[in-house]
Image: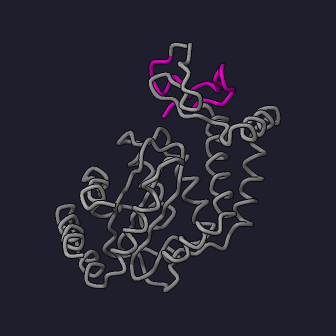
Amino acid sequence: MLLEQFLNFFDSDLFIEDFTSHTKKDIIKEIANLLETTKKIFKAEIIIDLLEKREQLGTTAIGKGIAIPHCRSMAAKELTVIVGLKPEGVDFDAPDHHPIKIVFVIIAPPQDVNYLPFLGKLVELLRDETTRKRLLRVKSFKGFKKVITEFLTNE
Amino acid sequence: MNDILQNLVILQDLDEMISELNNDEIITQQEEMGFEINGLEKLIEAREELIKRIPLEIFNHYNRVRSRYGRAIAPVRENICLGCFIKIPTQISSREMGNQVLRNCENCGRYLYWV
């Protein structure tokens, strides 16, 4: 996946600087409501239901403060990415039991070919310790995009 | 939004999620990325619960169309069924209007969902 193509999936309108919610369940609702109000999906309840079912399959928290809830849904018009911060941390049933401070949500229509490559690239980026630590300290979309861009250009 | 249509959309997404779990390549990819995949039984139970909220006749039609085309619900954009690319004859001017009623594509029979 090309650098620019990867970066273009991040959108300032879909960046939450501090979730108002304090639980995993409510964070999923907050994300789905944002998707509905920004008209990325027609009905928030569909995504809430699916993301909750995806969590039943196994937690999408990958540890070290990061969770990546993701699913394919025909409710999505295109691959959509939401990034949300929770500086105080929230329990997301992470395997290392650490509270989650950044949530990346990826929703894609069933036939979308960028879904797995995007997810793979994101995981690769988050495995880089320096980038991950920097991301855990960002406070704004501008700062977030700077960290991502620097990782990708230095690769 | 029509309640049955909403449940059908969730059912189709859930069926796709379950069928992906039968694909070893996808499972391996997900596990290599660090995701836990261990709750298939819970998903199957959730599907059984969901089916109870869908009238039998509609569920049977869903299964027939799904076995024929792979997917029983087609997204609609600009009044085109994206399952068979036929224009929907009914005048639907918004997503709200389109998703208020459960409709089938007159050509392919798929249930229609305005995205």
Residue B70, image x, y percentages: 68, 42
Residue B101, image x, y percentages: 61, 24
Q: Which residues are the magenta region?
A: B92-115
Q: Nearer the viewer, residue A84 or A121?
A: A121
Residue A39, image x, y percentages: 38, 39
Above/below status of A60 relative to A116: below
Image quarter of the C terminus of chain A = bottom left
Query: Could you tell me which residue is drawn at 61 percent across and 31 percent down?
Result: B2
Decide if residue B10 is in sight here.
Answer: yes
Give the left or right position of residue A51, taking residue B41 as reference: left
Query: Could you tell me which residue is drawn at 21 percent across and 68 percent down?
Result: A139
How many discs appear?
0
Image quarter of the N terminus of chain A = bottom left
Residue A129, image x, y percentages: 31, 85
Q: Is residue A75 magenta?
A: no
Above/below status of B2 relative to A109: above
Q: Nearer the viewer, residue A132 or A47?
A: A132
Q: Nearer the viewer, residue A3 or A19?
A: A3
Q: Nearer the viewer, residue A104 or B73?
A: B73
Secondary structure mainly formed by the magenta segment: loop
Where residue A147 sits, quadrant-wise, is: bottom left
